[in-house]
């Protein structure tokens, strides 16, 4: 069983070093200009000693805070601890109640603002961050008061979401309009998705590498093969087993073998308005797998690219858990910021 160790920032009671540069003129020579004891909100530290310095170049004074503290009343450790409680599934009021048990008074509104500020900081930091591989998936997240689906983009290098949008994943034109600016900004070269046809069109239009999630492929192909097992003539059932073996091994030349199997089957005999026979269903299955085979094997030529889209689905699962208790989000930007943070493993 994996054990996650979370280390919160240290908080010092006084500064251990002098400032290196003046925040106003970048000067490097200072005089100590007094000190003050500042009360702070923290789970361990109650007071810190803050020194004031005077720049010998511009003659302005400024405060030099100890590690883990700023001009705010809360320490960085307390802010992250409150956000961690929220990220793990507690409401803002429940997070505030737990902190009060640690003799720290922080209102639920303060925790809400901390979550928003931190999420916006994450968005700003990731705005131009290079991302090679992205996971995409659509989601209907209850509690948003909207029926329109949301498209979630995950950085597969970190497993953290970096973009959300009201986009219908079944509409390739809409997906392309939303994704193209992200590709240009972050330098995305490959994406991992489920097997919707719209993603294949977008990958081709944007000239991206495309890996189709093998979990989705094996699920729907396995269901189709089990159905054909009962209806296919016995002399052709060996084809089903060979298809299973090809999906298990995923050889690079699998598409050629699938095409050869497709050519061995008799052609379509039923009319368009008539139900397809089991052999015709098998032909259609072989042709679809043959055409999509390169999208199944992209991970073999792309280093560190996952062959499933599980990272995206895990992030969406965390968002859904958080959406059940989210209340008071009056705007899409505020909700987006909170859910981007909730989709990350840790704040």
Image: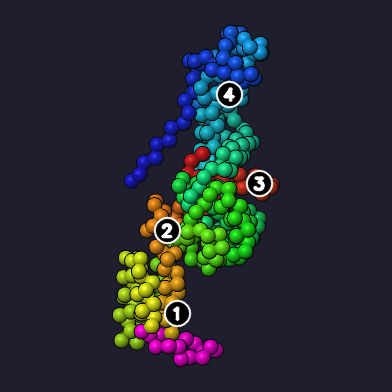
In the image, the segment drawn in magenta is 264-279
Q: Considering only order in the chain, which callout, 4 or 3, is on the residue closer to the N terminus?
A: 4
Measured from the top left, where is residue 347 in percent x and y? 51, 39
Q: Residue furthest front?
A: 207
In this picture, residue 265 sits left or right of residue 185: left
Measured from the top left, where is residue 248 in percent x and y? 33, 66
In this picture, residue 257 sits left or right of residue 281: left
Q: What is the CA distance from the residue labelled 4 to the residue labelled 1?
A: 64 Å
Looking at the rendered structure, the secondary structure element under dot 4 is: loop
Q: Is residue 273 magenta?
A: yes
Q: Nearer the viewer, residue 201 or 244?
A: 201
In this picture, residue 315 sits left or right of residue 165: left
Residue that badge 3 annotates: 333
Q: Considering only order in the chain, which callout, 3 or 2, is on the residue closer to the N terminus?
A: 2
Numbered label attached to residue 70? 4
Q: What is the CA distance from the residue labelled 1 to the residue labelled 3?
A: 45 Å
Q: What is the CA distance from the residue labelled 3 to the residue labelled 4?
A: 26 Å
Numbered label attached to residue 308? 2
Q: Residue furthest right?
A: 330
Numbered label attached to residue 284? 1
Q: Considering only order in the chain, which callout, 1 or 2, is on the residue closer to the N terminus?
A: 1
Quarter-wise, where is residue 122 in the image?
top right
In this picture, residue 83 sits left or right of residue 219: right
């Amino acid at each position: 069983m994996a054990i996650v160790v979370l280390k919160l920032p240290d908080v010092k009671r006084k500064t251990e070093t002098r400032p290196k540069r003046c925040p106003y003129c970048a000067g490097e020579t200072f005089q100590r200009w007094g000190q003050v004891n500042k009360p702070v909100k923290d789970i361990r530290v109650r007071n810190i000693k803050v020194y004031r310095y005077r720049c010998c170049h511009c003659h302005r004074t400024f405060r030099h805070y100890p590690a883990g503290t700023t001009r705010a009343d809360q320490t960085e450790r307390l802010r992250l601890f409150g956000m961690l409680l929220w990220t793990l599934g507690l409401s803002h009021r429940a997070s505030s109640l737990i902190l009060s048990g640690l003799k720290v008074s922080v209102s639920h509104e303060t925790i809400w603002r901390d979550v928003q500020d931190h999420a916006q900081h994450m968005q700003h930091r990731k705005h131009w961050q290079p991302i090679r591989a992205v996971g995409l998936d659509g989601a209907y997240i209850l509690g948003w008061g909207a029926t329109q689906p949301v498209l979630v983009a995950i950085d597969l290098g970190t497993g953290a979401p970096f973009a959300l949008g009201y986009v219908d994943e079944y509409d390739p034109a809409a997906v392309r309009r939303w994704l193209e600016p992200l590709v240009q900004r972050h330098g995305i070269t490959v994406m991992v998705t489920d097997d919707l046809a719209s993603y294949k069109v977008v990958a081709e239009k944007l000239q991206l590498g495309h890996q189709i999630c093998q979990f989705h492929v094996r699920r729907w192909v396995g269901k189709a093969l089990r159905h054909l097992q009962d209806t296919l003539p016995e002399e052709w059932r060996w084809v089903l087993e060979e298809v299973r073996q090809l999906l298990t091994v995923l050889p690079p030349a699998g598409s050629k073998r699938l095409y050869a199997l497709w050519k061995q089957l008799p052609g379509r005999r039923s009319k368009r308005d008539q139900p397809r026979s089991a052999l015709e269903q098998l032909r259609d299955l072989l042709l679809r797998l043959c055409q999509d085979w390169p999208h199944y094997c992209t991970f073999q030529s792309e280093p560190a690219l996952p062959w499933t889209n599980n990272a995206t689905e895990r992030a969406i699962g965390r968002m859904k858990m958080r959406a059940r208790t989210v209340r008071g989000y009056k705007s899409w930007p505020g909700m987006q910021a909170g859910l981007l943070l909730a989709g990350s493993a840790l704040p």
